[in-house]
Image (cartoon, rainbow, N blue to C red):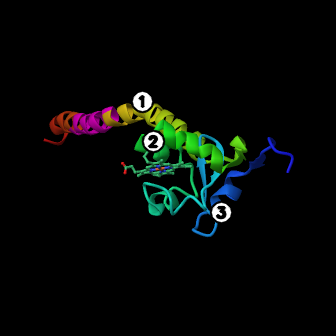
Amino acid sequence: MGGGVKKVYTYAEAAQHNGRQKCWIVIGGKVYDVTKFLEDHPGGDDVILSSTGKDATNDFEDVGHSSTARAMMDEFYIGDIDTATIPTKVKYTPPNQPHYNQDKTPQFIIKLLQLLVPLLILGAAVGIRFYTKPASA
Ligand code: HEM
């Protein structure tokens, strides 16, 4: 117990503490042991429990916690998350958006082809018919 030196946890390790017996939450890359705070939390224990096992930063921020609430967090701070082990933010947004953007060009070309190919086939059919008619008639 040297004081000052906090542990670094993997995301998976923190996520395992997701019950009333052991309840850790991850906010802004920091790990908070709120087990003893569950009953006292003004927002109730259920909301905190549903924010376990994941990065709770958005949940916490969405509530718009007061500066009083933020000051209380120090008390429960037990360490940091090894950021390389956080699956959420890094994997969520960036891959999704580029994929949509990248897909737009092929999708546009596919739409164009879906319009053009039938027209070409129709054109070819009409053409063939037109050119074969005099021969067969
Ligand atoms: C160490 C972490 C947390 C602390 C110290 C904390 C503290 C507090 C405090 C003091 C309040 C009273 C209102 C205020 O002062 O803003 C509050 C309300 C609330 N908190 Fe937390 N909170 C924590 C984590 C969370 C998490 C992870 C959630 C998940 C969604 C959450 C959801 C809420 C909700 C829904 C309210 C009720 C707001 C209302 O009734 O108007 N809190 N919290």
Question: Which residue sits at x=59%, y=63%?
Answer: 18
Mark 2 in CB contact with mark 1 (< 8 angstroms): no
**Secondary structure under the numbered disc 3 in the rendered image:** helix
Residue 31 at x, y percent in the picture: 66, 49
Tell me which numbered mark, 1 or 3, is placed earlier along the sequence: 3
Marks 3 and 2 sit apart, C-alpha to C-alpha, by 25 Å
Amino acid type shown at disc 3: Gln
Amino acid type shown at disc 2: His
Marks 2 and 1 sit apart, C-alpha to C-alpha, by 42 Å
Mark 3 in CB contact with mark 2 (< 8 angstroms): no
Residue 83 at x, y percent in the picture: 69, 41
Above or below, 21 against 34 in this view is below
Nearer to us in this view, 108 or 87: 87
**Secondary structure under the numbered disc 2 in the rendered image:** loop
Judging by the rendered image, the residue that carries numbered circle 1 is 105
Above or below, 52 against 114 in this view is below
Nearer to us in this view, 2 or 78: 2
Judging by the rendered image, the residue that carries numbered circle 2 is 65
**Badge 3 density bin: few <14, some 14–19, many ≥20, Cα 10 Å:** some
Judging by the rendered image, the residue that carries numbered circle 3 is 16
Which residue occupies the extreme right position in the image?
A: 2
Residue 74 at x, y percent in the picture: 64, 43
Magenta: main secondary structure equals helix
Q: Which residues are magenta?
A: 112-125
The dot on residue 29 is none
Amino acid type shown at disc 1: Thr
Residue 25 at x, y percent in the picture: 59, 53
Marks 1 and 3 sit apart, C-alpha to C-alpha, by 42 Å
